[in-house]
Image: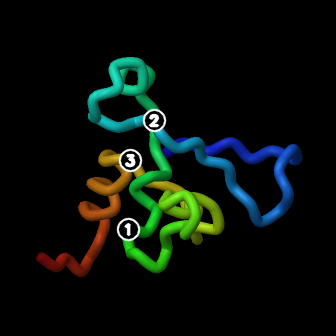
Amino acid sequence: MPILVTDEMIPGTVALPHGWGHSGSWQRANAAGGATSNFLASSLAEDVETLSGSTVLNGIPVRIEPAITTKEREEAWESSTVKSL
């Protein structure tokens, strides 16, 4: 997903809204598009908040790294002297 680096966040944190970017039954969420942190959340019983029964959606470890385009990947492959399957 695209990111925006800003000084409005505490260093070392990210904000990713949940509930969007899915193909569920919510018409408005489906139409809005976007990404969802729900796929990053654990589905293990021990990671469910006891009182509400909801999955814990904060404190999820993430990694941010540059993405490469298909064109960049193809160019890297073409310029590589060692090619593997």
Estimate the spatial distance between the alpha carbons at disc 2 and disc 1, rounded to whole Å: 18 Å
Q: Earlier in the sequence, mark 2 or mark 1?
A: 2
Residue shown at the point (34%, 19%) measured from the top left: 27
* Residue 48, percent from left and from top: 49, 68
* Residue 50, percent from left and from top: 55, 69
Point out the image quarter for the C terminus: bottom left
Left or right: residue 67 compared with residue 81: right
Identify the mark at residue 18; answer none if there is no mark. Answer: none
Q: Amino acid at mark 2?
A: Trp
Estimate the spatial distance between the alpha carbons at disc 3 and disc 1, rounded to whole Å: 31 Å
Kind of element beneath mark 1: loop
Looking at this view, is 21 or 79 the one in front?
21
Looking at this view, is 74 or 21 the one in front?
21
Estimate the spatial distance between the alpha carbons at disc 3 and disc 2, rounded to whole Å: 24 Å
Residue shown at the point (81%, 44%) measured from the top left: 6
Above or below, comparing residue 6 to residue 63 in the picture: above
* Residue 46, percent from left and from top: 46, 79
Residue that badge 1 annotates = 43
Q: Are marks 3 and 1 in contact (CB under 8 Å)?
A: no
Q: Earlier in the sequence, mark 3 or mark 1?
A: 1
Residue shown at the point (16%, 79%) measured from the top left: 84
Kind of element beneath mark 2: loop
Q: Amino acid at mark 3?
A: Thr
Q: Residues within 10 Å of mark 2 (few under 14, many from 20)?
A: many
Residue that badge 3 annotates = 69
Q: Are marks 3 and 2 in contact (CB under 8 Å)?
A: no
Identify the mark at residue 20; answer none if there is no mark. Answer: 2
Q: Can you tell which of label 3 and label 2 is closer to the viewer?
A: 2
